[in-house]
Structure formats: structure tokens, C-alpha cells
Amino acid sequence: MSSTISRRSALTLPAVAVAAPAIAQPAWPSRAIRIVVPSAAGGYDTYARLMAPRLSELLGQPVVIDNRPGANGIIGMTEVQRSPADGHVLLFAHIGAISVNTAIYRNMPLDPVEDLAPISVAVASPLVWVVNPSSPFQDMSGLIARVQAEPDRWNYANPSSGSINHLLVEDFKLRHRLVMPGVPYRGTPQAQMDVVSGQVPIMVDSVGAGWGHISAGRVRALAVTGPERSERMPNVPTTVELGLDPQPVVAWYAYMAPKATPPEVLRRVNDAVNVVLREEATVGRFRELGAAPRLTSPDETLTFMRAEREKWGAVARAGNIVVE
């Protein structure tokens, strides 16, 4: 008898005899996880570095922080966008890179909110208005009155064009009719030093980055922008309670991944991040830095990022803020 199976008989064979063998999917993670931070070392990568050891324990693989600064986060974000969507390359970026850049760059190569996969908004930090102690500004009402009375005389230090610090001040200027030119810098430390030295009298800094200068008396804190007073500065009011801002403003930092990363991988990263954020050690370290953990799902993260993109895009358009 011929060993050849006819087409008709093959169609009647049990399915198991003709089905292709299943291909086993590799377990995730199968190697080290690289978290790209699109800024220079010594900045907000501190938050990612604090969380990395516990994330490594929870996920069972090394977690490595890789700083890729440049173009207000665009270089690092583009690298993550082009990486394999297998969960081994992630992003940890700030509000400016994720939800502001699309409004201020004419030739933005990607829309991070839509072209990357959100995982978690993990950290939030209020900002703080500070002035040089020798300046005449004792409180925010005095600052506003003086700047209104003397337009173009008083400058503010802008640590990075297109940063949340920059847009917050520009929005404030529009709402309070202030003519207060910005002096651009390539980073927070240089801007801080010029405020400390009195070269520029005013700045909006993050609570964490500015605390050393505030606590040492090298600058005077006038108001914080968060939803409540800072534990570090309980006598410093919020701009909302002063009636100067309609709502709180915080700098935030989030985890993302390449767009096609499997949903189950996104969920596992989100679960691990939220475990770390609930731990007392993490909460305590963040508090020392003037920040607080946030627990959000991937869906909540996407909704929040879209709202922030719309909010700050409107500010950029109103102030005609463009970065070439």
C-alpha cells in the first residue's frame, strides 16, 4: 500500500495530526530591563534609581538606569520608541518631555502620548516660587504688584526652555498681566546659582531640587504650586490658597514603553511599580525629596497624559512659546 496520504483522507484525519506545533512564548523578563531616562544624571533620574533595586527583586532581573539626555527628552524617547516592544526597554520621563514637547517644537518627531505605551505616572513634585533674599519681594502679592508697576525690569531664571517651570511662569504672566522676561539656561543648577548670586532675582524651582538653597537661606520661598503646603515649608502658602492659580500644578514623572509592548507586560510593570510606591521606604525617601508617589493604571495614565498635553498645549499657544 502506498504511504502517500490522499488529499481526501488528509481532510478526514483528526485535527491533532495536521495542526502545526504550538510555539512556546518566552517568559518575561528573560534578561536585564533597561530604563531610559532622557535627561542628564543627577536630576529626576534619582526617582528611577531609588525604585530600581526593588523593581529588580520583584521582576527577577537586573534593572539598569540609562541616561540619554538631549533635546528636552526627545533623543531618549525616540530611542525607546524604536526599541523592540518586548518589555526589556522602558522609559522614565518627565511632564515636559511627554506632554509639553508636542506643543512647543515645530518638528517634533513623535507624540509620546500616542506613540508610546503608558504604564504609570509614578511620582509628583510641587514647584516653588523662590527669590533672591536681597530682592524686594517678601510675598507673592508684593512680587506681582512690583512687577506690574515696573514692567521689563525684573527677570526670571528659566532652567530649560519648554520645561514645566518655563510654561508655568509664562501662564502666570499672562493671567496676572506681568511683563517679566525670562533668562534661559541649560539646566537647573546654573539657573539656581544665578538666583543665589542675585544675577536674576526670581525662579520657579522644584521643591526637591531647590530645597538645599531654601533651607540654607540662599533663596526665599514665596509659594508652592502643589495641592497642599509642603511638609518641609509649612509656613509657605500655596498659590491656590492665595487665589493666584486656579488649580495646583505639579511636575510629574512616568514610566512608558514602546507602543506595541504586550498589555500583559505593561500590567506586570505597573503592578511592580505600584508595589514599590506603596512601601514605606519609598514613601519616606520621596518625602525627603519633596515628592510623593502616585498610583495609576495604564489606562488612567493615558487619560491623564492626554489632559496634561491639552492643558499645556493651550498655554504654549497662548504665549506663542516655540522652541526651534
Image: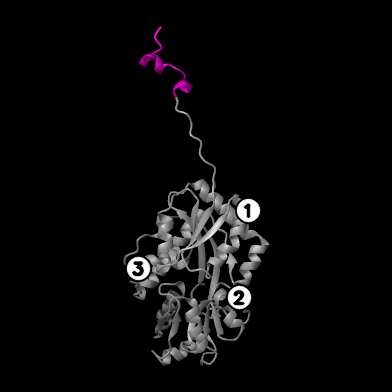
Mark 3 highlights which residue? 105
In the image, residue 105 above or below residue 147: above
The mark that comes first in sequence, 3 or 2, is 3
Q: Crowding at label 3, few (<14), some or many (≥20) Cα neighbours within 10 Å? A: some
Lower sequence index among marks 2 and 1? 1
* Near-viewer residue (148 or 50): 50
Q: Is residue 254 above or below residue 219?
A: above
Q: Please name which of the two marks, 3 or 2, marks the residue nearer to the observer.
A: 3
89 up-or-down from 42: above or below: above
Q: Residue at x 60, y 63 (%)?
A: 50
Q: Which residue is mark 2?
A: 230
Which amino acid does the dot numbered 3 rest on? Answer: Tyr
Identify the residue shown where x is 56% and y is 56%.
63
For numbered disc 2, what is the local secondary structure?
loop
Of the two numbered discs 2 and 1 in the rendering, the one whose residue sits closer to the viewer: 1
Q: Amino acid at mark 1?
A: Glu
Dot 1 falls on a residue whose secondary structure is helix
Query: Circle 1 is placed at which residue position?
Result: 57
- Front-lying residue, 261 or 238: 261
Q: Is residue 202 left or right of residue 280?
A: left
| C-alpha separation, residue under disc 3 versus residue under disc 2 | 33 Å
Provide the secondary structure element on which disc 3 rests. Answer: loop
Could you tell me how far apart the alpha carbons at marks 3 and 1 are, in whole angstroms?
39 Å
Pick out the residue farthest to the top.
1
Magenta region: 1-18
